[in-house]
Amino acid sequence: MRRRELLLLAGNLAFAAEDDSGWTKSPRNPMLSLGKDGDFDSHNIMSPSIVKEGAQYYLFYAGGPLGPRNGGELIKYQLGLALSTDGETWKKTGKALLPLGQRDNFHVTPALLRNPDGGLRKQDGKWHMIYCGNREDDVEYATSPDGLQWTKDSRSPIYRQAYAPNLVRAGSEIRMYYIRKPAPVNGKNIPWEVHLATGRDLYSLQAHPSNPMLKISQSWEKNALFYPYVIRERATWILFYASYWDKKDPKDTKGYTAIGMASSSDGIRWTKHERNPLLTPIPGSPYESVYNSSQSVIRDGDHYKMYYATRIDMIHKYYAICMARKSGKILA
C-alpha cells in the first residue's frame, strides 16, 4: 500500500476511535480535491452543497484559481459541480456553472432550495440556488431546469450582507439562515452571528425580529460562527455550524475550525449540543489537518452523509472536500 493511502487510512481510523458523536469520516476521503493548473478550482475548493435527485448525487461547490502559491490573490472564485452514483466516487463536470460579472465577481457558498428534510425543492419545475456573489456578501439567485445548466436571475442581488446563506422551505415561507458580520464597535471586532431572514418568496426576505439565532457561547468557539446548515429530523430542527476552534493549547499557534450543532422545536429558538464540537480536524492529515467547516448534510437511506471542506495550511484557503456519515438519527 502506498504511503499516502496508509496516511489516509491511519488518519480516519484514529478519528473513528476518538469520536463519540456518531459521525465517522470516510476512509475514501477526500471526496474532491483541487483541480489541475489552469482549472477554475486549481488553488481552492470549498463550501459543498449536496443534494440527491433520483439515483444521482449532485455536489455543488466553490473553487478558486489563484492564491499565494501562484502569486495571485484569493479572488475569482466560481461555482462548480461534481456528480456521483454512490455519493463517494465523484466526477467533476469540469467547468464553472456561471460566469463572473462586474458586480458579482466572487461566487461562493452555493445553497439549493430544499424541503425541511433536506431533499431538493423544485418550484415551477426548476431548481433554485442562491450564493454569495462578491466580498460584500450580496446574495445572488439562479435557476436551472436540470441542475446542470444555470441562469442568473436579473433581479439579483435578492439580499445584502448575508454570508453563507442556507435555504429551506418551511410551510408557506422561505427561511434563509445566514452569517451576519456585525460592524466593529469602538474599533473592536464583534464575533459573527447566525441570523435568519424569512419571506413568502426569495424576493421578499426580511430579517427576523428574533435575530440573532446563534452567537458565540461555548468554550470551544472563538471569533466567529459561520456556514449554517439547517435540516429537520421529524419534529426537531437541527442547525449545523462551524467556528474557529479554541483548543486551549498556548503552544499550538495554528488556526483551527470545527463543526458544531444546535437543535430547536421551531427553527427560531436554538440550544447548542452539549458535546460540541462534533467534527474536528485530523492531526497530521495530508488533507484535513486544521479546518473542518462549510458542511452540507443529506439523509441517504438509513444514514446521513455530511460533506465538509478542509484545510491543511495557510497557502490554500481550502484544500479538499470530505465526507462523514452517521447511521440512524442525528439526535440519537
Image (tube, rainbow, N blue to C red):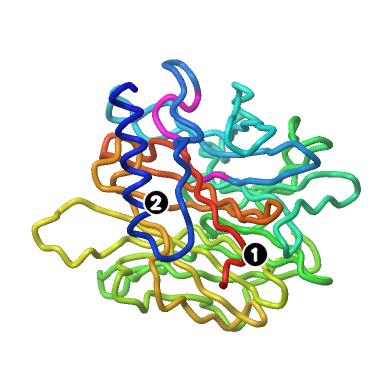
In this rendered view, identify the residue nearer to me: 124 or 120: 120
Q: Residues within 10 Å of mark 2 (few under 14, many from 20)?
A: many
- Name which residue lies at 60% across and 80% down: 264
Q: Secondary structure at mark 2?
A: strand
Q: Earlier in the sequence, mark 1 or mark 2?
A: 1
Q: Is residue 96 left or right of residue 115?
A: left
Question: Which mark, by number, is residue 43?
Answer: none
Residue under numbered circle 2? 292
Q: Is residue 41 magenta?
A: yes
Quadrant holding the N terminus: top left
Amino acid at dot 1: Ile
Q: Is residue 280 magenta?
A: no
Placement of 80 over or under 228, stated as above or below: above
Residue 26 place in picture, x, y as percent: 48, 43
- Quadrant in the picture for residue 242: bottom left
- Name which residue lies at 31% across and 40% down: 10
Q: Residues within 10 Å of mark 1 (few under 14, many from 20)?
A: many
**In the current view of this chain or complex, which residue is farthest to the right?**
124
Q: Secondary structure at mark 1?
A: strand
Residue 187 place in picture, x, y as percent: 25, 69
- Name which residue lies at 48% across and 62% down: 22
Quadrant holding the C terminus: bottom right
Question: Which mark, by number, is residue 231?
Answer: 1
Placement of 302 over or under 218, stated as above or below: above
In this rendered view, identify the residue nearer to me: 183 or 14: 14
Residue 42 place in picture, x, y as percent: 43, 24
Contact check, label 1 and label 2, Cβ < 8 Å: no
Give, as a single range, the part of the protein colored magenta.
40-48
- Name which residue lies at 66% across and 32% down: 84
Placement of 10 over or under 157, stated as above or below: above
Amino acid at dot 2: Asn
Residue 175 place in picture, x, y as percent: 69, 67
